[in-house]
Image (cartoon, rainbow, N blue to C red):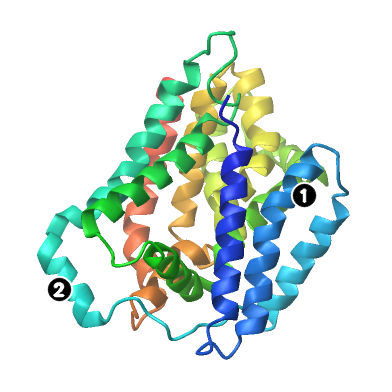
Amino acid sequence: MIKVEWFYWLCGIFFVLIALQVLNDRSNPKRIGSAVFWGILGISFGYGTFVVNKQAPAWLLGIAVIGLAVLAGSGFPGKGQERTTTPAQRIQFADRFGNKLFLPALVIPVVAALFGAWLAKVKLGDGKPLLQTGSATIIGLGVASLLALAVGMALLRPRSPAVPLHEGRRLLEHIGWAAILPQMLATLGLLFNASGVGKAVGRVTDHLVPKGSLIAAVALYCIGMAVFTIIMGNAFAAFPVMTAAVGWPLLVEQFNGTPAIVFAIGMLAGFCGTLCTPMAANFNLVPAALLEMKDQYGPIKAQIPTAIPLLGCNIALMYVFAF
């Protein structure tokens, strides 16, 4: 059986290697604090396995999260000046390979979809599933990333096998602390749900939705997912709150909706909110920084005309196909 933990460990090893690289980068004025930041993150991936297996206390991870927040608030991680290629060399690569440069990126969704739709159903000789139950998509994403790396190496033939690691560090240094924002916001959503926010929102929605109105319940769930995503910056953070308030009690239990369709389209509705909020820094502010755009809110302004009609389409799709 292929376990999802293996890919978490691989992520941890990657971040630890990044920390070692940063520590040796004399061009980074914040190299020590930056190395500590990435090192804590990398070690947390491996340590989490022992927490899940009840072999280690979880409070140490809590201290690690607080440490990451303190470092981020103190201006870490910083940027170094080391680069694997010059701007002129990158232009030369673009002219030479053209659209072939997109091949590694296209490998990821194709392979991940194959794992989620097909390999998730494959059984081994002893009847056990090939992939860890409930983690087929994440495992597929991990395998797809490794295959995309192999395709990129075969296509570009870098002078050193360490070039992908150096380029990964370059991108992480551009993104900074926002790289861990999705995990933090997803955890925030779980905390909101555990503290009863979802139930409180559910009591409010009881007064907003006309009794027996399916279209009103669907619209409220989808719009609520988008609004909460705008507030919290991540659809994964909004999902447990709105699902506990509207998705499960109204759409699934009361109107007998198909859970897979309801929740999948609900996440897509949340992503419409992602397109509209600066809180989703890793999606909207980071690209502006990487592209050195004059208007840091340029991506949001360009995405809003798409996000609003797309939200309407998600409402229609859920109403037609989920019930």
Amino acid at dot 1: Leu
Residue annotated with mark 2: 92
Q: Nearer the viewer, mark 1 or mark 2?
A: 2
Residue at (39% x, 32% y) in the render: 113
Determine crowd level at label 2: few under 14, some 14-19, many 20+ residues with C-alpha closer than 10 A.
few
Side of 240 relative to 102 (left or right)? right
Check the image and report above or below for 43 versus 66.
Answer: above
Q: Identify the image quadrant of the N terminus.
A: top right
**Residue 310 can be seen, yes or no:** yes
- Real-space Cα distance between discs 1 and 2? 48 Å
Q: Which of 290 and 56 is in front in this view?
A: 56
Which residue is at 49% across, 71% downward? Answer: 175
Q: Which residue is drawn at 29% across and 54% down?
A: 152
Q: Residue under circle 1?
A: 191
Relative side of 33 to 86, left or right: right
Secondary structure under tag 2 reads helix
Q: Is residue 247 above or below residue 28?
A: above
Residue 217, percent from left and from top:
57, 31
Q: Nearer the viewer, residue 202 or 10?
A: 10
Instruction: Say whether residue 10 is left or right of residue 115.
Output: right
SS for dot 1: helix
Q: Position of residue 240 (x, y in %)?
A: 67, 41
Residue 171 rendering spot, x and y as whole percentages: 43, 70
Instruction: Tell me which amino acid carries mark 2.
Output: Gln
Q: Residues within 10 Å of mark 1 (few under 14, many from 20)?
A: some
Tally of numbered tags: 2
Q: Quadrant of residue 51?
A: top right
Image coordinates for residue 253, horizontal then vertical, percent: 66, 19
Judged from this view, the residue extending furthest toward the top is 126
Q: Which of marks 1 and 2 is nearer the N terminus?
A: 2
